[in-house]
């Protein structure tokens, strides 16, 4: 396999919001720098854990601009450009490309259930064709438990054939190890096509199969631990390192609380800034009691 266009540990960056629900840009920029200094190779601005679909395209583009203007290299950024509207998805993708970002992570259209593979191909093709820029590197986002729309290996193969080089990879957030390993078959047929897992719990398996790394919500709170596994996936104690990455996720899942709200509570605890625990509707903030219960499960506390 030739060198992948993108590799490493990426955080789908949490988005801090003010009391009026606007993006807190100074806190956002500070957090982006914190994640890169903490071990992330790069960031995915406006992925699922960023609450991306709760923000307008104009808000998302303005936030990308602010991050780059603050001195964070665009080469460290992938931008989530998924939208139900093809035109809006194309606008977001074009903006990412013209800003010099490394790639676009793009959801399928996520409203109509049971859409055909042909319909999905046409949707992605319309974005490629409207952007019409050879610099575009699109990573397709497979998260069927949320979007309701699976991306099959045959669809990804067709896209890779139709847009060689520009159809650059896939993020698999299904959590299904067999599905992840099946996507490696697509990658083997298209050198440079990168497979990212959406959970650090499968990072070792993904690397062993030739994958590019992970785009994991846990990287918002454990970037150094996940980076350690990425750097040492061939070490004799790699399984032990893998197990070290799982404890925060397990504590949140066992609590039954929303993942995004929980991650924001942990960041609020790490930074000492209570405003970090705020989410944008339709998500709901954890109550004070729920926050205390969650943090009590994380013993010892997640290191800052």
Image (cartoon, grey):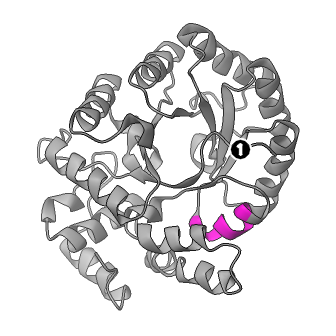
- Measured from the top left, where is residue 230 in percent x and y? 59, 67
**In the drawing, does residue 293 fall left or right of residue 205?**
left
- Measured from the top left, where is residue 134 in percent x and y? 60, 16
Rendered image quadrant of residue 153: top right
Q: Nearer the viewer, residue 289 or 6?
A: 6
Q: Nearer the viewer, residue 29 or 178?
A: 29
- Measured from the top left, where is residue 103 in percent x and y? 53, 33
**In the drawing, does residue 279 fall left or right of residue 217?**
left
Total numbered labels: 1
The majority secondary structure of the magenta stretch comes to helix
Q: Is residue 46 magenta?
A: no
As drawn, 107 above or below 144: above
**In the drawing, does residue 119 fall left or right of residue 203?**
right
Mark 1 element type:
loop
As drawn, 225 above or below 21: below
Residue 47 in sight: yes
Bin the neighbour count of mark 1 within 10 Å (Cα to Cα): few under 14, some 14-19, many 20 and up. few
Q: Residue at x 21, y 52 (%)?
A: 30
> Which quarter shows the C terminus?
bottom left
Q: Residue at x 79, y 54 (%)?
A: 179
Magenta stretch bounds:
200-207
Residue 77 in sight: no
Q: Which residue, as the protein is rendered here, is positioned at the far bottom?
A: 300
Q: Is residue 206 magenta?
A: yes
Disc 1 designates what residue? 3
As drawn, 103 above or below 297: above
Rendered image quadrant of residue 61: top left
Q: Residue at x 57, y 47 (%)?
A: 146
Q: Residue at x 88, y 38 (%)?
A: 189
């Amino acid at each position: 396999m030739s060198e992948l266009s993108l590799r490493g540990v990426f955080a789908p960056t949490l988005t801090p919001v003010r009391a009026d629900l606007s993006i807190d840009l100074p806190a956002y920029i500070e957090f982006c720098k914190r994640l890169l200094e903490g071990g992330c190779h790069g960031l995915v601005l406006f992925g699922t854990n960023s609450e991306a679909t709760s923000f307008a395209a104009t808000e998302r583009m303005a936030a990308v601009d602010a991050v780059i203007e603050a001195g964070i290299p665009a080469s460290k950024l992938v931008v989530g450009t998924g939208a139900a509207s093809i035109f809006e998805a194309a606008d977001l993708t074009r903006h990412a490309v013209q800003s010099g970002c490394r790639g676009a992570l793009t959801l399928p259209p996520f409203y109509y259930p049971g859409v055909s593979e042909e319909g999905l191909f046409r949707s992605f093709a319309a974005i490629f064709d409207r952007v019409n820029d050879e610099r575009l590197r699109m990573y397709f986002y497979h998260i069927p438990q949320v979007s309701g729309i699976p991306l099959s290996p045959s669809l990804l193969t067709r896209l890779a054939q139709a847009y060689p080089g520009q159809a650059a990879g896939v993020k698999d957030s299904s959590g299904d190890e067999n599905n992840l390993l099946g996507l490696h078959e697509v990658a083997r047929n298209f050198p440079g096509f990168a497979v990212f897992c959406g959970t650090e719990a499968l990072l070792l398996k993904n690397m062993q199969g030739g994958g590019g790394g992970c785009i994991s919500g846990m990287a918002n709170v454990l970037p150094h631990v996940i980076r350690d596994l990425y750097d040492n996936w061939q070490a004799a104690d790699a399984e032990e390192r893998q197990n070290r990455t799982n404890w925060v996720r397990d504590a949140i899942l066992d609590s039954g609380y929303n993942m995004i709200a929980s991650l924001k509570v942990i960041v609020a605890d790490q930074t000492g800034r209570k405003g970090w625990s705020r989410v944008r509707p339709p998500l709901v903030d954890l109550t004070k009691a729920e926050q205390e219960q969650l943090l009590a499960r994380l013993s010892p506390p997640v290191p800052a």
